[in-house]
Image (cartoon, rainbow, N blue to C red):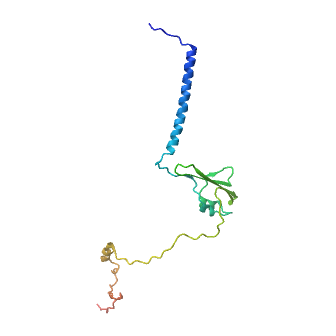
Amino acid sequence: MKVYHPVSFQDFKHSWQLMKNSLLFITFSTCLFLNGCTFILDHLPGIYRIDIKQGNIIDQEMINELRPNMTKRQVLYILGSPMLTDTFHKQRWDYVYSLREKGEPTDQKTMTLYFEGENLSRIEGDFKPTNTSGIKPSKDRTIDVPPRKLDKTIWEMITGLFDFDDVPTSGERPQNKDTSTGEPLKTPDIPN
């Protein structure tokens, strides 16, 4: 015969407190462990990290090409379409560029263009145009290459054997040519 011992309210309260403390400890330990794992994984040596580029790639040369009173179409040609266009402020274009190099913190650059009508009026942001005026000298070089005297290819030699460019069409008389000058030879006309 089994004897059942009644559980008192004090025993229930004590076990509930133990379970609650255990869950709190396990939750805290798990959070700490997972946070530690991401730190360790981010700083492991020998793991290759790629560069992550997002947004409009903008450099200083592109900004230097911008001039006041440029049309929207000209700006689109130089910088590309804006990352953000506000439907309430159509005269404002926002360009955002972010770069994360090999696990380093993200470097984010922004630029805002303001238009009056269809023309560029001002630029704000991380990039500022420099005072370079005029045409920049080209970095391209022109090299004159002397012509090469090439021998005929095998295909040209084979097709040269069957060259029918000098064969007269029907109704024409064949002309004999002088091999040294390439001029036609004069032959007397023979009556029939």
Whether residue 154 sits left or right of residue 25 in the image: it is: left
Residue 141 placement (x, y as % from top left): 51, 72
20 vs 118: above or below: above
Q: Residue at x 50, y 42 (%)?
A: 40
Residue 43 placement (x, y as % from top left): 51, 45
Whether residue 192 sits left or right of residue 144 in the image: it is: left
Q: Residue at x 52, y 33 (%)?
A: 30
Which of the pair 177/11 is nearer the observer?
A: 11
Whether residue 138 sits left or right of residue 164 in the image: it is: right
Which of the pair 142/88 is nearer the observer?
A: 142
Q: Residue at x 54, y 35 (%)?
A: 32
Residue 40 visible in image: yes
Labels in figure, total: 0
Residue lying at the far left of the rendered structure:
192
Residue lying at the far top of the rendered structure:
1
Which of the pair 130/29 is nearer the observer?
A: 29
Residue 95 visible in image: no
